[in-house]
Amino acid sequence: MTVPPLFTETVELPAAPPFDLGPALRFMCGFAPTAGEQAVDGGTLTKALRAAGRTVAARVVQAGDGVRATLHAAEPLTEDVVSATADRIAFHLSLGDDLTGFYAIGREDPAFAPVLDRLYGYHQVKFPTPLENLVWAILSQRAPRAAAARGKHALRDAFGDRITVDGAEYAAFPDVDQLVTLSAGRIAELVGNERKGRYLHGALHAWHGTDEDFLRTGPYGEVKEFLLSLPGVGAWSANFILIRGLGRMEETPLEKALRGAASRAYGRPLSDADLQRIAEGYGPWQGYWAHYLRAAA
């Protein structure tokens, strides 16, 4: 069967310097929640996304201080789809994060400076959408990673948002308009857990009624309060979504993985009090400090 040609469009997306796509691609290769959901070939990332109600495959490479994204779709790429896809890519790769203040503090921290050198130019890779982070946070609670991945992929496959580029097929995670069409029972069937089905159903409908711009840029306390109001979302999940889904770096959750990574970097066992004291020295960048430590580890 002949596959119809795809429509393509290329966009240039600037990044706040310093920026290096290489560390981001290396991070993606080891990030379990999205394993196998994109292709990394040398310095090229290819991934399918939902944007403005459409499925688009983006092929992203470094271009100067930013990236060049070639978009592929089965239908003409209208201006709103291109704009929404560009925004999604830029947010996913945190292209707009100005790290100069963070780097200035880190250079004055002798134990942390080698971590900066190793990851220089790395802007945090967030979940492709904060919605996907929400779903993963609920599915992964007290569950093996493989079980959470099966549930996530079952939700994805329920909608069949797939696109083939150069002979390889890519699947996009559904958007909230799609997910809210599923009943609680159907979600439970797909994810294999009745309780998490109820949690997801309630959380998705609440998410559908809010504005992502508010979640990205609204007052930190209000956004955190909204997340904590969602079924199945506790303090750990809320902080997880704030940092890894929304790029809100104002707080650092103290947990075992961070304690281990920081203890290795600082060359001694660190208590929670030690972590809190060091993190506070990074001010609004403390989330980046913690993420760099985990990424380097």
Image (cartoon, rainbow, N blue to C red):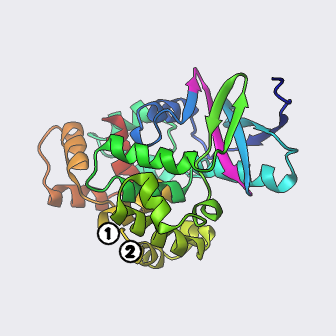
Is residue 137 shown in magenta?
A: no
* Amino acid beneath label 1: Gly
Residue name at image x 81 percent, y 27 percent:
3
Report the Cα–Cα distance between label 2 and label 1. Answer: 6 Å
Q: Main secondary structure of the magenta part?
A: strand
User: Which residue corresponds to the image point at 34% horizontal and 33% vertical from the top-left?
Assistant: 114
The residue at the point 16 percent across, 61 percent down is 273
Residue 42 painted magenta = yes
Viewer can see residue 182: yes
- Earlier in the chain: of badge 2 and badge 1, it is 2
Residue 132: image x %, image y %? Answer: 51, 54
The residue pinned by badge 1 equals: 234
> Which disc, if any, is residue 228?
2
Q: Quadrant of residue 243?
A: bottom left
Q: Position of residue 63 (x, y in %)?
A: 70, 31
Which of 242 and 122 lies nearest the eye of the viewer?
242
Q: Amino acid at mark 2?
A: Leu
Asked which quadrant contains residue 139, the reply is bottom left
Q: Residue at x 21, y 55 (%)?
A: 275
Q: Position of residue 259 (x, y in %)?
A: 20, 48
- Residue 53 position by quadrant: bottom right
Q: Nearer the viewer, residue 219 or 278?
A: 219
Residue 125's place in the image compared with 248, above or below, is above
Q: Is residue 296 above or below residue 139?
A: above
User: In the rendered structure, which segment of residues is drawn in magenta?
Assistant: 40-52
Answer few, some or many: residues within 10 Å of disc 2's Cα (few below 14, many 20 plus, some between 14 and 19): some
Residue 8: image x %, image y %? 83, 36
In the picture, which quadrant includes the N terminus?
top right
